[in-house]
Each structure stands twice: as structure tokens, then as C-alpha cells.
Amino acid sequence: MKTFFQAIALAASTLAPAAHADTESIQGTYRAVLRHDGAGFYQYALFTLSTVNSGGGVLRISANVRMVYGDWNSNEFLTYDFADVPMNILTRQISLRDPTNDVSFIGQLGDGEITGDWYSSSVGRVGTFAAKKDALPARPEGQRLARSASGHYRGRYTNSNSQSNLPERMSLSLVTTQDMSMGRPQLVLSGNLRMFLGGFNSPEYYESPLKDVQFNFYTRYLTVKTEQWGLTIKGTLSLDGVLDGEVFADGLGRVGTVHLTAVE
Amino acid sequence: MNRTVIALFALAACTQGKISERELRRQQQTDQANLKRQELESVAGAYRGTLKNDSGYNQTVLLNLDVKDLPKETEDSVDPILVPKLVGGLRFQFGGDDSREYVDAGIDDSDYSPSRKTIVLVVKHQQFDRMILRLEVIGDHTLEGTWTAATVNASGSAHFERSAP
């Protein structure tokens, strides 16, 4: 009996302590969902964190954030670099901010997940975000994926100025590209406006390239100017791809309204 | 004159066999230091554990405790005495043990009470200024307790197991 308990004690003493799970590595790619609170939609983003141990037990974190417009396969995205990302090792607070970027992210990192609030320099606090290393965070209920601005829109122009006689049928094509000429990424929109004398399939139309296209992704406010004819269209491009706006002509002022719907 | 010289020699001969009070005190301090060193060496070593904060995050940490003799000035001694003290560092480890993702913080001050079996460590780092670890020594392998960092308003629990040599 004594030998039996001695054997138990010996076995117990050789048992290793309970396995201890390692803290998740910081570096890696995190897939994120960014919510636009108050606007009713969300968008995807990719956070890539890199770490460097610069010696002396100092860990430097840098990040690259790719904000996607449309679904994950969309080729419309903006990238932002954050050279120095401070993270407090006790509170786990992490801050992605850079004066050259117009978005910033403040949150907490832990267990392969980053959660917090994100901000735009143009509108302030935009909403909350969640980024996960191994999985996509849950999509917010009741909200829709932000549609990219690129597309082809068709619809009706309604004249309200007796001195203007623009055709009733209009189509607007928008293409987004990324411009790095300023040293930091800028989403650039270009395209053309077509006014049909007949139906939308008619070969009888006037077409002008667009210049100075401005689109505020957060408010969805779009302004386009034609190179020819001195026309300006201003309005809101909704999440569903509907543009409701006003049309202005140089020298005449407001000439009418436009209602265009995305067809592709 | 001859009597004076003889008296002086006699006095010198008498005092050769006695230990001075200063030497006696020094011997006592040395004995106390040796005892303290033994007590500290019982808890010195390498530990692996977790700091859990109040938000629920678990942080893997490696604690290294060493015994070092540090000079201490005393009023009644010309020479400083050597006092053993726990020194070392805390490593916040991310990823596996082979990962180079880690942050090191040094132990700025320490106190060990063998009667209460408690260790208090003051850890310093620029991110949180001071973090105080209060640990209870449980058996030969375990340290368990709490941590607080007032400057960042953070606190939580701590658990360490002695690492295999």
C-alpha cells in the first residue's frame, strides 16, 4: 500500500504544469469590417501589421491599411501607411495615426483581434471597426456593403430652366483609379457624360469627358464637371447606386435635376 | 621612561586577542547578508507565466530573478556593506518563445519576505512608468498574485511557474 501511494506521488511530481497558451503574435494580416455609423453601411479593409525588434527589448510596430470599396475582389482601394504604431503592452491600446493620412484607427489589440473606433479627417469619427487575423469579423446586421463609385449609371434629366433644352436621357460612366503622384494614395474618379437624342441604345448622342470629379466617400456626395458644355452635376450617390442631383450650366445656373441608376 | 615603554608593550599585548566592535558588527552584517542571500536564492530563477488584465487579455511573460549583492552605505561603517537583492527583468512575449516579438522591462526594486512568502517587484518601463507585482510564493515552483500600473490605470492578476533548467 505504501509503495502504491509512493508511486502515485512520484507520478504526480513528474506531471508537467498545465499547458500555457502563448500570446498571439502581433504581426500578420487582419481582415476588417469598418462600420459607417449613422450612414447605414460598412466596408472591408485589410490591416497588415509588421514588427521589428530594434534591440534593447524595444518592439516597433508599423502598419499598412487597405480600405476596399466594394467587395473583397474589388480593385478599388486606398492604402495608408503608418510608420510607427504605438501599442501599450499593459492596456493593449493601439493607435494607427499619421498626419499624412486622412484616416486613423484607435483601438485595442488582443487575441488576434483589433477593435475600436476609426476616424476621417473630413468627418471626424466615422464608426467602429473590428479586425481579425484568422477570420472575417461578423458583418453588421441591417447594414449594407458600401458600393464602389465605379459603374455605369442611366436615367432621366428633368429640365427646369426655359433657357435650357438638354436631352431627357443621360448616362454617366465613372471609373476609379489610384493616384500616387502626390506621394500618398488618392482615389481619382474619371469618366464621361452622354446625352441621348433618342433611346439609350441610339447612336445619336453627345458625349463629353468629365473633369474635376469629386466624391466624398463618407457623405457620398458627388460633383462632376464636363469638359465641354460647361455642365456640372451635384448630388448624392446612394449605396444602391442611385444618383439624385442637380444640374448646373455655366452662365445659366441651375437648369434641372437628374435621377440616374446604376446598371452595371 | 623604561617603565612607560614596558607599560605600552604590555597594553598592546593585551589587546591583540580581542575583536574590535566594528569588526564584530561587520561580521554580524555579513552573516545576515548570507542568510538573506540564501532566502533570495530560494526564489531566484526563471519563470514563465501570464499577466491577465481586467479587460480579459492574457499576456505571456517571462520573469527572470537573480540575486545580486548591492553596496549599501551605513552610518556606523566606513565601508559600504553588500546587501543581496533580487534583480532581473520581465519579458512580454508575443508569439512563441522563438519569436522576436517581445518587450523587455527591468526590475527597478524588489522586496522578499520569507515569513509571509511574498515578493514585491517594481517593474519599470517607459510605457507604464511603474508596475507593481505582488506575488505569493506557493511551493517551490509557483508565484501567484496581482499587478497594478497606476499611471495607465491598469491592473490584473499574475501567475508564474518556474521554468525547467
Image: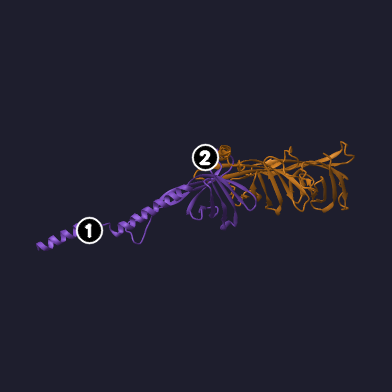
Q: Amino acid at mark 1?
A: Thr
Nearest to the observer: residue B90 or residue A251: B90
Disc 2 marks which residue? B164
Find residue B160 and report its horizontal and vertical position in percent: 56, 47
Front position among marks 1 and 2 = 1
Q: Secondary structure at mark 1?
A: helix
Find residue A223 and report its horizontal and vertical position in percent: 76, 49
What color scheme is it? by chain
Q: Please give the label number shown on residue B15.
A: 1
Q: Please give the label number shown on residue A228.
A: none
Tell which circle, 1 or 2, labels the residue nearer the N-terminal end: 1
Left or right: B14, with A114 as reference point: left
Label 2 Cα neighbours within 10 Å, binned few <14 / some 14-19 / many ≥20: few
Can residue A170 be seen from the camera position used here?
no
Is B22 situated above or below A225?
below
Which of the chains bears the disc numbered 2?
Answer: B
Nearest to the observer: residue B12 or residue A113: B12
Task: Report the quarter where the N terminus of chain A lies.
Answer: top right
Spot the residue most to the front. A1
Left or right: B78, with A97 as reference point: left
Which of the chains bears the disc numbered 1?
Answer: B
Q: Amino acid at mark 2?
A: Ala
Task: Report the quarter where the C terminus of chain A lies.
Answer: top right
Q: Which chain is orange?
A: A
Find residue A225 and report its horizontal and vertical position in percent: 77, 47
Count of all numbered marks drawn on residues in the image: 2
Nearest to the observer: residue A77 or residue A46: A46
Q: Which chain is purple?
A: B
